Image: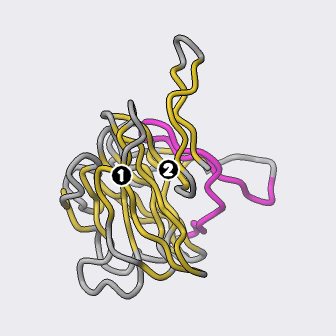
Amino acid sequence: MSYGIDTASRALRWTQPGPEVVQAGAGMAVGLLHVEPLTSVPLGVDLATGTEKWRGEKTYAAIMNGAGPGTVRAAGPQVGDKGDQLLDVISRTPRATMPPGMRAMSCSYDRGQALVCTHGFAVVAVDTARGTLLWVLKDGDGDRKPQAVTAVWHGRVRTCRPSPKPRRFSPTPSPGWC
């Protein structure tokens, strides 16, 4: 169940059964509505009234991440070449297509210009406006090893590693700490 609450008056404005909201803003609450086991539908709900504004197609093993003001990333394995896109939350139209091979990656918006995406073999940053790669840290790049990303913020990446001693890395153009 999702709830629309006016934070100024603390009044409950609406309830919507089912959607798992991943981003609220630009007048919309956007998320995934689980319709069958392992199958979801992208859904956009008016933030003020809770009425459904748009609904996408059923997607097996769907992933949705917030990707900046008015933008979400929607991905699914069976959608074809355009199955990993950055969508406008109001119109559901694609703003950009994510680079290939990233559908299984989980992404976090850095509140700047990048989605930082992780998988066991790499940490990748993607420009949220154009869907282009900003930088990649792959397993075996020099002496660097991708770690578990714990936080991202305006071009900074915070990771965990077994050693308590942090070290600096600088994947151009976005430096961070490992």
Total of numbered circles in the picture? 2
Please state which of residues 8 and 178 is positioned toward the viewer in this rendering: 8
- Cα–Cα span, label 1 and label 2: 11 Å
Q: Earlier in the sequence, mark 1 or mark 2?
A: 2
Please state which of residues 55 and 100 is positioned toward the viewer in this rendering: 55
Element type at mark 1: strand
- Residue type of the residue flagged with mark 2: Val
| Residue at far top of view | 9
Query: How dense is the environment of label 1, judged by Cα within 10 Å: few (below 14), some, or many (20 and up)?
Result: many
Which segment is the magenta one?
A: 143-163
Residue 131 occupies which quadrant of the picture?
bottom left
Residue 12, compared with residue 177, is above or below; it is above
Residue underneath mark 1 = 44
Query: How dense is the environment of label 2, judged by Cα within 10 Å: few (below 14), some, or many (20 and up)?
Result: some
Residue 42, compared with residue 89, is above or below; it is below
Indicate which label's residue lies in the foreground, 1 or 2: 1
Say if mark 1 contacts mark 2, CB within 8 Å: no
Left or right: 159 as drawn, with respect to 49: right
Left or right: 151 as drawn, with respect to 47: right
Percent coordinates x, y for residue 154 in the rendering: 43, 36
Percent coordinates x, y for residue 8 in the rendering: 52, 12
- Residue type of the residue flagged with mark 1: Gly
Residue in the image at 32% along x and 83% along y: 79
Residue underneath mark 2 = 22
Element type at mark 2: strand
Residue 11 among those drawn in magenta: no
Percent coordinates x, y for residue 71 in the rendering: 31, 48
Left or right: 23 as drawn, with respect to 98: right
Residue in the image at 42% along x and 69% along y: 41
